[in-house]
Image: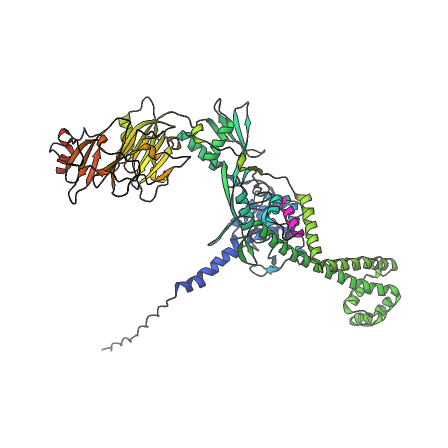
Amino acid sequence: MAKKKKTPIVEEAPPAPVLYQPITETIEKNYMPYVMSVIISRAIPEIDGFKPAHRKLLYTMYKMGLMTGGRTKSANIVGATMRLNPHGDAAIYETMVRLTRDNEALLHPFVDSKGSFGKQYSSNMKYAAPRYTEAKLEGFCSELFSGIDKNAVDMVDNYDGTMKEPVLFPTTFPNVLVTPNLGIAVGMASNICSFNLAEVCDGAIAMLKKPSVSTERLMELIKAPDFPGGGTLIYNQAQMLSIFETGQGSVKVRARYSYDKEQNCIDILQIPYSTSIEQIMDKISDLVKSGQIREITDFRDEIDLSGFKLTLDLKRGVDPDKLMTKLYKLTPLEDSFKCNFNVLIDSTPRQMGVKEILKEWIDFRNKCVRRELEFDLQKKKDKLHLLEALAKVLLDIDLAINIIRRTEKEEDVIPNLMKGFDIDEIQANYIAEIKLRNLNREYILHRVSEMEGLRNDIANIIDILSDDLKVRALIASQLLEIKKKHGIPRKTQIVGEENIPVFEENEEEENFPVRIMLSRDGYFKKLLVTPRMNPVASEQKLLKETDSVAFFFDATNNDELMIITDKCQAYKTKISSFGPLKSGDNGDFLPTKLGMDDGEKPIFIQIRNDYPENENLIYLFENGKGVRIPVSAYATKGTRRKLTGAYSDSSPIVAVFAEKASKPVDILMISNAERAILIKSSLIPQKATRTSSGVQLLTLKKGQKLREAHVEFESKFENTKGYRKLKIPATGTLLEEKDIDIQQLKI
């Protein structure tokens, strides 16, 4: 019988120890490198005005020789750029699209394009695939690369070390202020608007001449942002000063239009840079459907080869200027551009105003120009050094020929020339490499004649480098040349805000009958009154299953409403500010529409176009007290839309009623002990102060409180004579068994 093999006992390895890491250490080691990579290498532009993606693309096109010659397929450019930017061809092509002339996103485009590249002002106009489009660099790009081959900026290895790329471009003008830039990093963002090139050059020249130039002087030269899409900028002095000093602020831009009298239509020709034609058309469509805009019969996109155009067909007799003032108020035809000038300076993000950005650019450009001059200086010195040797050879050409001819070994030629003419090795190599045909007096005299010019150039460069004022003067002269060569008139018109007509809501709105509903959940709805409208059916369609109607009445579109809430506040609004909705819709949620506080609910609403002394609001509280406040106490001056302290907060509110002039109303009050009193509102004393707590109306025992109050109660209570009281305070009468409310409680 075979022996059973013993199963070896395998000891289980002890569990690996759990390593705990503080959250601060996790963020520092794992998250912060990602954050810094996004900020420094992706989203925030540097002082040359470019992000890495832009710089890699443009430099690739420069190395491809696309500054001159014909265009090449965009696919070739995208493929070549991946040697520097290996983040996918789609991202590279999207970057190039924005830099093209056809996309119209820049005041001065960098890419000369051919094909469909979409439009900055339209989200629906898509660009064609890179295999269909062609591109090359614009001539304007010469200002970006000037000096790049003269050691003007540092060059670093690309991601795999196979080629070099520039850290920055030695831009000869403050491109950071001329090219618009938007970048969202981690914990910060950058939103730089474009300024006019000629104005920016003037501002930079002024600062070069006088570094302490005032902000006010700069604002005279660089008047305001200039957007590629044009439009009209509404000039606000305080906001502009903030942008120039801190880099933060907001500028309002509105569309520009023309009126075609023959066709009775408005042609919108320029829109704000921060919006699109689709956003504008969608908003106009909503306003037309809701009835807020009734002056337009049709509108359409008429963009063609001649440029942007949005056409609005008008009804007969409509004033186009008043309509546009209204549209500016209600649509993105007027929009704000929020400036946030975050720029990387030596890999550190800094928020700077226009003035500080110009100062940093001048410092950067100063270094670039000095490096270019030092490069040229060294080249000229090297050339002069060689020509000095040539001048010595000129004294005895035959000796040079004899030295070379009589030298037996090739390696002895250079040493023999060095001895024969008292020159160094570099000069001897240059002499030895001269072709035999050039060893004649004419050639050598021609070359030697350059020496005087070289000496003058060297002396001039040394003189400039030794004087910072001369370097700044050189930069200023370059800027002046750029302004003359590339400057263009402003595209964005500037208008002072004091000259902008203000849209007056009550003057513009058309008046027509409407039906108003407010539900207990706070949903407000405005219905257009039509001959076929069934009030009962309409009321049913307005409600959710869990909601009910609190107020339902007729009004006109220009009526003003006053809303009382459960937080002792009153709100005023015009019915015209609400759009008429379809019967099946829930309506506008009033707390959101009016900007109420969290948890605040409307409890009373009425038409209130005036505030006479002989009309009152009646407030009833849980503690059984009540008060009458004249509506004149709620009259406000100007356009104030919110009123705090509308009534007393000494006890929770139960009900609010309106009392017309000399027309007291009957009020039925019921406590939680099922006791009721019926009194005339004239018994409630009137108080002039809104926050008066009132007087006791219903006598309550301990633990009892006023539960509800009604002014329309005939349908719920069959016989109310027994509840009538002629004096206050009064003790409530027990509710009768036949009253509907009691029956429902028993069921």
Most foreground residue, 468 or 408: 468
Is residue 80 among the parts visible in the rendering?
no
Q: Is residue 500 left or right of 447 when viewed as pictured?
A: left
On the image, the x and y values in percent for residue 90 come to 52, 48
Instruction: Verify whether residue 576 appears in magenta.
Output: no
Is residue 168 among the parts visible in the rendering?
yes
Q: Where is 563 relative to 261, above or below?
A: below
On the image, the x and y values in percent for residue 240 come to 55, 44
Quadrant position of the N terminus in the picture: bottom left
Quadrant assignment, res 563? top left
On the image, the x and y values in percent for residue 238 come to 53, 44
Most foreground residue, 291 or 591: 591
Q: Which residue is drawn at 77% across and 69% down?
A: 425
Residue furthest left in the image: 737
The majority secondary structure of the magenta stretch comes to: helix
Quadrant position of the C terminus in the picture: top left
Q: Is residue 686 left or right of 185 when viewed as pictured?
A: left
On the image, the x and y values in percent for residue 110 come to 61, 46
Please name the colour scheme applied to the rendered image: rainbow
Q: Is residue 479 left or right of 683 when viewed as pictured?
A: right
- The span picked out in magenta is 199-213
Q: Residue at x 85, y 67 (%)?
A: 400
Quadrant assignment, res 670? top left
Q: Where is 101 relative to 268, above or below?
A: below
Q: Where is 609 relative to 435, above or below?
A: above
Q: Where is 129 relative to 44, above or below?
A: above
Q: Residue at x 60, y 57 (%)?
A: 165
